[in-house]
């Protein structure tokens, strides 16, 4: 008890009345290390997380129904839509037609029929404009021209990845249209039919599934793909905030929808490589963070070691007047703990009250996603624990090394 | 009864291949309530003897009994605890903890000894007053003069009522007036039955003690009673 009391007595006064520059330096170092740990890791994971979230918001919604592997479309769509409409927890849904198609541009200027035409292959999506926009808000992502209007025929919106000017890469495997965009006439070939359409807008959402597609009115696409039975290719379902996605999915399966459609939550609907990249970036973030923790520990070690060496005589005197060596070591550990608490507290304030809210409002404009800072409490707590442990270690060990010295050697600075 | 009893204390150091003898078999006995000065020229071994008597360094050979305890059988931690209970230290450069006030410097060893905080404060204030520093308790060491710091150091050494006070050149950095005041305090302690052993190279102060032990080349050259 006396040891604890004396250690606290020394530590408190040393911290309050000691070298403020050294204290400030140590606290700043811990603060920056914590910010580095949280922000760098968070940005790396957030890079993919935001892409993943955008995919959910703009494309798959909470649950995505698509044709089973052996089928070209979702059979019994009207019955499934009826099931969806009466399933508890569903707040909205949209249907989409999605067919592989070829789009050709500049064919009117082509003098020699043997010349290679300017074309690209992509999925053409037939959508209900009003419902689609209400669910996914993709009209907000128009970067040129405008979105489709209700009951508008002869118009098409192209995903930015289909235009050379947005993807200026010359690669044999990558087909893009070298056109200016809005106002151009293009020929859509789908289901063995050709249709001339006018490009009315270009969409760029940083969601691959959207930017790689073209969009037109479902009513105009349906006859082109000979789909007269109301069966569709995709159904995206939005679940209410208080409902569980897995519960709604289970209800759909229980209702028999899985016999005609593949039912996936938004996470399952994402390509596996997204999750792999997310995990990879999380590991990278941890590696970078760990290097930061080690570098910071070494620096704190040096600061405390220098401080302990400078106060070697004082440590010797404390021992000489009968202060237990454990109390002296504990005093240094308490000081480190104090620096850790203040440094990590400041780091949390900077990270979670300043940087994260700012980035949430102003996402980082990465080429393929609007970067956010992805953090979870377990990972944050793990980082706090790691930094605390490193700080305590870096503070305690140098003190231990000095205190262990012979009292007279410490007093005489030998 | 002897508070200090040393038999053939030796201390040697190695400097490369050379063996340096700092203490060459010192035997002495200091009684309870005795005020003793240890003098000698620089390099005579008086500081080395001081460190042995205070249990902050280990002799190479010999035996040492302090306040009835075989000091050389104690572990480092036991020695620290022993010093806390039995020895009061006064250093030439005062050796106050710079981040503690005068009062806190005195309170610290009392807290270590398990004295409750309020009682420790009371003892510290009384002791500080006994060395003429009432009203200076809240001052940090750098706000006090050398003489005042030395008196705080003395107050710290005596606050826990040790049987033995060891003072290493306590007047070396002080003016004559302050030095005389310090000597007066030591005489008072002696009169209260506390043993005071003072290292000094100043003869005028050595003559104020009960006995002067003079060292030369690590050995006792002579002993004189005043």
Image (cartoon, coloured by chain):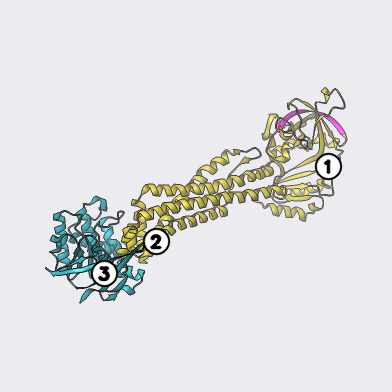
Chain colours: A yellow, B cyan
Numbered disc total: 3
SS for dot 2: helix
Q: Name the quadrant of the C terminus of chain A.
A: bottom left
Q: Name the quadrant of the N terminus of chain A.
A: bottom left
Res B219 quadrant in image: bottom left
Q: Please name the residue shown 49% across and 56% down the image.
A: A390
The answer for which chain carries disc 1 is A
Residue contact at pointers 3 and 1, CB within 8 angstroms: no
Left or right of B166, for residue A242: right
How far across and how far down the image is residue A7, in percent? 37, 61
SS for dot 1: loop
> Can you say whether A262 is above or below A227 in the image?
below
Q: Which residue is mark 1?
A: A230
Alpha carbon of mark 2 to alpha carbon of mark 1: how far? 78 Å
Circle number at residue A329: 2
Left or right of B67, for residue A410: right
How far across and how far down the image is residue A246, in percent? 70, 54
Q: Check disc 2: other Cα within 10 Å, few if <14, some if 14-19, many if 20+.
A: many
């Amino acid at each position: 008890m006396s040891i604890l009391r004396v250690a606290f007595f020394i530590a408190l006064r040393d911290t309050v009345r000691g070298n403020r520059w050294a204290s400030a330096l140590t606290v700043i170092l811990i603060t920056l290390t914590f910010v580095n740990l949280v922000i760098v890791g968070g940005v790396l994971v957030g890079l993919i997380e935001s892409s993943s979230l955008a995919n959910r918001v703009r494309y798959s919604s909470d649950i995505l129904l698509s044709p089973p592997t052996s089928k070209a479309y979702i059979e019994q769509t009207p019955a499934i839509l009826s099931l969806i409409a009466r399933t508890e927890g569903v707040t909205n849904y949209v249907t989409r037609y999605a067919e592989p198609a070829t789009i050709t541009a500049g064919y009117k200027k082509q003098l020699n029929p043997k010349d290679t035409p300017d074309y690209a292959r992509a999925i053409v999506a037939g959508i209900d404009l009003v419902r689609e926009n209400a669910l996914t808000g993709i009209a907000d992502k128009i970067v040129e021209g405008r979105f489709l209007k209700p009951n508008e025929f002869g118009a098409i919106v192209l995903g930015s990845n289909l235009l050379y000017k947005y993807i200026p890469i010359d690669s044999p495997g990558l087909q893009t249209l070298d056109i200016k965009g809005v106002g151009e006439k293009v020929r859509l070939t789908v289901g063995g039919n050709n249709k001339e359409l006018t490009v009315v807008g270009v969409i760029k959402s940083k969601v691959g599934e959207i930017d790689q597609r073209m969009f037109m009115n479902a009513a105009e696409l349906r006859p082109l793909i000979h789909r007269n039975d109301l069966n569709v290719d995709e159904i995206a379902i939005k679940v209410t905030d208080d409902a569980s996605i897995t519960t709604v999915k289970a209800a759909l399966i229980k209702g028999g929808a899985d016999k005609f459609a593949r039912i996936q939550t938004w996470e399952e609907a994402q390509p596996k490589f997204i999750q792999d990249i997310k995990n990879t970036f999380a590991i990278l973030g941890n590696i970078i963070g760990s290097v930061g923790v080690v570098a910071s520990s070494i620096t704190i070690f040096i600061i405390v070691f220098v401080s302990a060496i400078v106060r070697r005589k004082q440590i010797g005197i404390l021992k000489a007047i009968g202060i237990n060596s454990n109390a002296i070591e504990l005093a240094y550990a308490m000081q480190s703990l104090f620096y850790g608490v203040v440094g990590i507290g400041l780091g949390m304030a900077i990270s979670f009250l300043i940087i994260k809210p700012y980035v949430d409002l102003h996402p980082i404009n990465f080429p393929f996603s609007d970067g956010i800072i992805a953090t979870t409490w377990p990972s944050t707590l793990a980082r706090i624990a790691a930094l605390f442990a490193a700080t305590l270690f870096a503070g305690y060990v140098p003190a231990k090394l000095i205190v262990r010295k012979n009292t007279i050697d410490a007093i005489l600075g030998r | 009864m002897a508070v200090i009893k040393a038999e053939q204390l030796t201390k040697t150091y190695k400097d490369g291949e050379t063996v340096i003898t700092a203490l060459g078999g010192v035997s002495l006995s200091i009684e309870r309530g005795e005020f003793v000065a240890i003098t000698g020229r620089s390099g005579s071994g008086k500081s080395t003897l001081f460190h042995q008597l205070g249990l902050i360094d280990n002799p190479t050979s010999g035996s040492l009994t302090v306040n009835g305890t075989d000091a050389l059988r104690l572990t480092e931690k036991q020695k620290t605890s022993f010093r806390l209970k039995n020895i009061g230290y006064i250093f030439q450069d005062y050796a106050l903890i710079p981040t503690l006030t005068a009062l806190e410097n005195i309170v610290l060893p009392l807290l270590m000894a398990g004295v409750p905080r309020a009682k420790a404060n009371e003892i510290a204030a009384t002791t500080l007053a006994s060395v003429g520093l009432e009203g200076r308790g809240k001052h940090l060491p750098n706000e006090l003069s050398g003489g005042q710091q030395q008196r705080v150091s003395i107050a710290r050494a005596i606050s826990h009522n040790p049987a033995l006070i060891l003072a290493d050149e306590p007047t070396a950095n002080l003016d004559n007036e302050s030095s005389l005041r310090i000597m007066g305090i030591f005489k008072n302690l002696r009169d209260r039955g506390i043993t005071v052993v003072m290292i000094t190279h100043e003869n005028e102060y050595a003559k104020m003690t009960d006995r002067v032990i003079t060292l030369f080349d690590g050995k006792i050259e002579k002993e004189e009673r005043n």
